[in-house]
């Protein structure tokens, strides 16, 4: 057995060389879950027997020289809004407590076809929006870097489980930052792909035009490997892009010499000034890229508040339409945070929604234009390290614009990665943004940064 | 962000949703509604009449 925290890339190479047993790796993860989940609450349902059966099958394929590919035998888990056939999919809500889908969602199926081993279902904010909540059937996940602190959300269980080494990677969803927020607070990598790249079929919806599915893992390289299996056209998703899937790892080792990086400095220095530690982490990262040969320049977009306004109005209106029947009949069966936030969606007029969509097109055009002159954009992922989980977070999304909403509004791909730690040992992060369907350039820049810095060598001591 | 709409007018808006809110719930949501008012003001409505929304219907694929 290798060290306690193998990455997907490392484990994949070891499995292919028959130096690591998928069964042994799966047992290792299950042991860590048994020990740490009572503290972290990252899993709300474990599927040990199925996992071991899948691991044994993967091992047999490897030994027979018939491995399915680089993800064969890799232990992962799914956010509990991803439908899993025969296994409850609850959205962390009382309303779906007994919901057992008949079929896997497309992304779940594709990851299974790639040979991954599913260890169970992961905590989320209720219906991927309301949290952290303490009035749901399961407690909220805890941050493994300090369990008094928030994981971020809504892919909270995935963030905690990956950071703590309970799984090597997992799935998340992102409507306003629900992959990148927990990736940021838990010190891992997470990508919200281009809208349409990964099918949302079989994933509980929040907001149809803003919802994205994507992977979370310890490294950028691991995210590229997972995304490779998840991406691709799916007729079951009306927004799915019918285009060839590129090799997301193709540019991984090209370095960043000549890459043009635009910094949306006003987002994190003027519109919503970030903590000094976060600002310093971003500046240090820019120096790393500059030292590796990238060109750095500032870029100006509309204020962050404009993106937030559009994103929130669209999300609330669309989500309210999804939940209205239950909101009218089972209002108090939802957790307080979800239901109170959702109630605001019922008060948005149709004309307000359409005006938000008209402004959305303008914002999309300006971000597209900005990316005509640079290859990627950089800003913060979150405004600081993770706050305490008991901080009053119910209305923060409404009062303070977040840095992740712009790419849900535009649909452009965005990657969050760790860029250091506070003196107290909590992770810091930044966000990279690229042109639509140019995830490979995000991975290229992110991998170069991870290779040049020591942050991937540090794990939580939980 | 202080809410501009009065509690009485907001009660009418809330009633139109059909949601069964307690008085305490309605008061808290009214207080939060000021953030929505600010967002709607930020989005505005002053743009060319022909400005299309971001989502359109494509007849050949729907």
Image: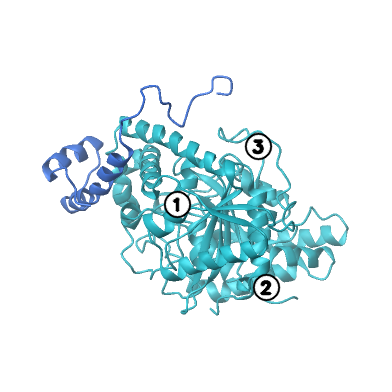
Chain colours: A cyan, B blue
**Of label 2 and label 3, which has the lower sequence position?**
2
Occupied quadrant, residue A323: top left
Q: Circles 2 and 3: CB distance less than 8 Å?
A: no
**Image location (x, y in percent) of residue A201:** 57, 40
The disc at residue A128 is: 1
Q: Position of residue A244 (x, y in %)?
A: 71, 37
Is A371 on the left or on the right of A131, as rendered?
right
**What is the chain identity of the residue bearing mark 1?**
A
Chain name for mark 3: A
Quadrant of the rendering where the N terminus of chain A is positioned: bottom right
Residue displayed at 45% across by 62% down: A152
Residue found at x 61% / y 43%: A198
User: Residue A382 sits in which quadrant?
Assistant: bottom left
Callout 2: residue from which chain?
A
In the image shown, does A173 or A335 lie closer to the viewer? A173
Which is nearer the eye, A298 or B11?
Answer: A298
What residue is shown with label 2?
A28
Residue mark closest to the camera, 2 vs 1:
1
Give the answer, above or below, for where A116 lies relative to B3: below
- Mark 2 nearby-residue class (10 Å; few <14, some 14–19, many ≥20): some
Residue A110 visible in the current orientation: yes
Q: Which residue is mark 3?
A: A233
């Amino acid at each position: 057995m290798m060290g306690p925290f193998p990455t997907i890339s490392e484990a994949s190479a070891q499995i292919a060389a028959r130096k690591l047993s998928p069964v042994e790796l799966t047992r290792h993860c299950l042991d860590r879950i048994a020990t740490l989940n009572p503290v972290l609450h990252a899993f709300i349902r474990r599927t040990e027997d199925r996992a071991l059966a899948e691991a044994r099958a993967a091992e047999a394929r490897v030994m027979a020289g018939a491995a399915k590919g680089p993800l064969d035998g890799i232990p992962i888990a799914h956010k509990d809004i991803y439908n899993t056939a025969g296994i409850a999919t609850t959205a962390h809500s009382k309303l779906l407590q007994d919901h057992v889908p008949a079929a896997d969602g497309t992304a779940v199926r594709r990851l299974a076809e790639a040979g991954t081993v599913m260890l169970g279902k992961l905590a989320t904010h209720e219906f991927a929006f309301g949290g952290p909540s303490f009035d749901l059937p399961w407690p909220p996940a805890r941050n493994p870097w300090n369990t008094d602190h928030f994981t971020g959300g809504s892919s909270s269980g995935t963030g905690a489980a990956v950071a703590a080494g309970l799984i090597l990677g997992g799935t998340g969803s992102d409507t306003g930052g629900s992959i990148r927020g927990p990736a940021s607070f838990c010190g891992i990598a997470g990508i919200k792909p281009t809208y349409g790249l990964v099918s949302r079929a079989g994933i509980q919806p929040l907001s149809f035009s803003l919802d994205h599915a994507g992977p979370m893992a310890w490294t950028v390289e691991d995210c590229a490997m997972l995304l490779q299996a998840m991406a691709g056209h799916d007729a079951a998703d009306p927004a799915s892009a019918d285009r060839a899937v590129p090799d997301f790892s193709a540019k991984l080792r090209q370095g960043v010499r000549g890459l043009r990086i635009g910094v949306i400095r006003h987002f994190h220095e003027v519109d919503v000034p970030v903590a000094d530690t976060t600002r310093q982490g971003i500046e240090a990262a820019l120096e790393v890229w500059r030292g590796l040969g990238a060109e750095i320049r500032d870029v100006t977009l509309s204020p962050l508040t404009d993106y937030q306004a559009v994103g929130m109005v669209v999300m609330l209106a669309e989500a309210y339409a999804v939940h209205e029947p239950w909101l009218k009949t089972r209002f108090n069966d939802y957790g307080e945070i979800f239901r109170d936030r959702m109630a605001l969606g019922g008060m948005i007029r149709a004309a307000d929604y359409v005006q938000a969509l008209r402004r959305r097109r303008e914002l999309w055009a300006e971000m597209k234009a900005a990316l005509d002159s640079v290859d990627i954009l950089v800003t913060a992922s979150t405004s600081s390290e993770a706050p305490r989980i008991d901080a009053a977070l119910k209305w923060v999304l409404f009062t303070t614009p977040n840095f992740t909403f712009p790419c849900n509004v535009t649909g452009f791909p965005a990657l969050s990665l760790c860029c250091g730690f506070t003196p107290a040992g909590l992770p810091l992060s930044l966000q990279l943004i690229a042109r639509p369907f140019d995830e490979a350039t995000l991975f290229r820049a992110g991998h170069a940064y991870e290779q040049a810095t020591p942050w991937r060598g540090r794990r939580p001591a939980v | 962000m202080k809410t501009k709409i009065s509690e009485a007018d907001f009660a009418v808006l809330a009633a139109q949703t059909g949601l069964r809110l307690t008085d305490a719930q309605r008061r808290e949501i009214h207080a939060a509604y000021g953030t929505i008012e600010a967002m709607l003001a930020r989005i505005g409505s002053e743009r060319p009449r022909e400005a299309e929304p971001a989502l359109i219907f494509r007849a050949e694929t729907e």
